[in-house]
Image (cartoon, rainbow, N blue to C red):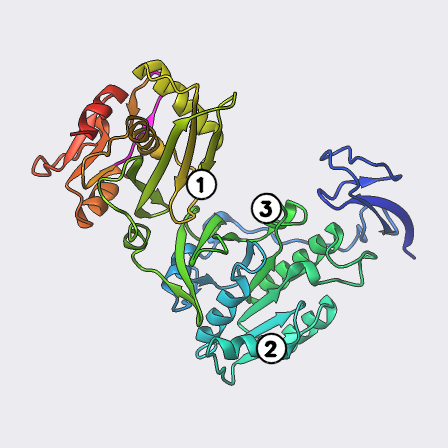
Amino acid sequence: MAKSKLIYECQACGEKHSKWQGKCNSCGEWNTLVEVVEQLAANKHGFSALNTTSTVTNLANVNLKEISRIKTDIIELDRVLGGGLALGSVILIGGDPGIGKSTLLIQTMDKLSYTKKVLYITGEESIQQVALRANRLNIKGNSKLFLMSEIKLESIITTIEKELPEVVVIDSIQTMYTDQIQSAPGSVAQVRECASILTRIAKQKHITIIMIGHVTKDGSIAGPRVLEHIVDAVLYFEGDQHSNFRMIRSVKNRFGAVNELGVFAMTDLGLIEINNPSALFLSSYRSNTKGSSILVTQEGTRPMLIEIQALVDQSYSMPAKRLAVGMDSYRLNMLIAIIQRHLDIKLFDQDIFINIVGGLKIAEPALDVAVVMAIISSYKNQPLINKLAMFGEIGLSGEVRTVQKGQERIKEAIKLGFEKIIVPMANLPKDKSVTKVVGVKDIEQLIKHSFD
């Protein structure tokens, strides 16, 4: 018979300790150890070591049939997923409270339910609350959209095996618990075990399971990191609650490209997909604006044009302020140092603020030239050339370096009517008939081609 003992488990990383202490030795977090009961198996393996077999298959005999996908009829979501929901996959969606995760999924399940059997399981709301939200979104439902309010995993598994739905939504994984673990719902052990069991069910029954995950203060999905490792795709729902823009980004996808981006607008009737986000992000852009530049960025397989704004002003406190919204603040400090070193522009006594319009977060280095030109434009109090777009990475020696998928970026900028595009020299198109593109080697040439 299995025995049990008391241990202390870190709620941040899952590390187990034999006694309580204020600080976790593994992750360094304070006051995260919680007392739990650990079940000890009859032998050290946790199962009978005898009479267990596994199947070995030769690689040449594996059936390489194409993965079946379920189209959601929401183009932006299908793009992020790599073409739709892969059959038997497990998808984890995270995002800030109230950002629109449940709204997106109830809209998606409504569209799927006309051709597929769908089960929406909520652990945070009653069935009536879900129905009220659906009614507010003008969703009437049909015979294949089923709702269930339950947090006990054993009851959920029994229902799944009985109903055999093709798509299941778990809202949210942090509210679920299993009797196999003696700890409260939301604990590291409960989240890890529930996610593992649901993943096994998805693979065995070929059911697509979508799990909503809470996020921590720093924006990462709450619970152990193993939660992101065991699922097939991890999506993050981003956006400012004070803005209508919502972005869903894939940070892991075993069935498609990572860092793919889908763009939505939040309205009274729910989320509406935006098929041309460049036009949306530039809708408020005004030409001849000082401290403004246009970046051609690449999010997954999609090029987009984004406005970069900079404000440079005399500082009356030391050290001067440096603030970046939508980009890495350390990279901003590096670009400021490059400007001071290679252009002999002294910015040590200037407050510098950078904003990427639309609430988008850009991590790729191709934004360097746009940030630098926005800073210089604000510092000189002089606007850049009208209808100018640019992209490129800047090295520490002041050179402008090549970036990926340059031709796609150039085509997108030309399509939107930009008359001059500054690119790294190595990204110049081979087609000499494209006269709108100018290649630059270093930051000095960048300045020369950006102003009248």
Asked if residue 177 lies in the magenta stretch, the reply is no
From the viewer's perspective, is 284 left or right of 38? left
Q: What is the x, y in percent for residue 160?
A: 63, 73
Callout 3 amino acid: Ser
Q: What is the x, y in percent for residue 146?
A: 57, 79
Q: Which mark's residue is nearer the viewer, 2 or 1? A: 1
Residue drawn 45% across the image and 35% down it: 324
Mark 1 lies on residue? 326
Residue 286 visible to the viewer: yes
Above or below, comparing residue 265 to residue 371 in the picture: below
Residue drawn 28% across the image and 47% down it: 285
Label located before the other in sequence (3 or 1): 3
Mark 3 lies on residue? 220
Mark 1, secondary structure of its residue? loop
Q: Which mark is residue 6?
A: none
From the viewer's perspective, is 437 left or right of 212? left
Above or below, comparing residue 216 to residue 20 in the picture: below
Mark 2 lies on residue? 147
From the viewer's perspective, is 175 left or right of 368? right
Callout 2 amino acid: Leu
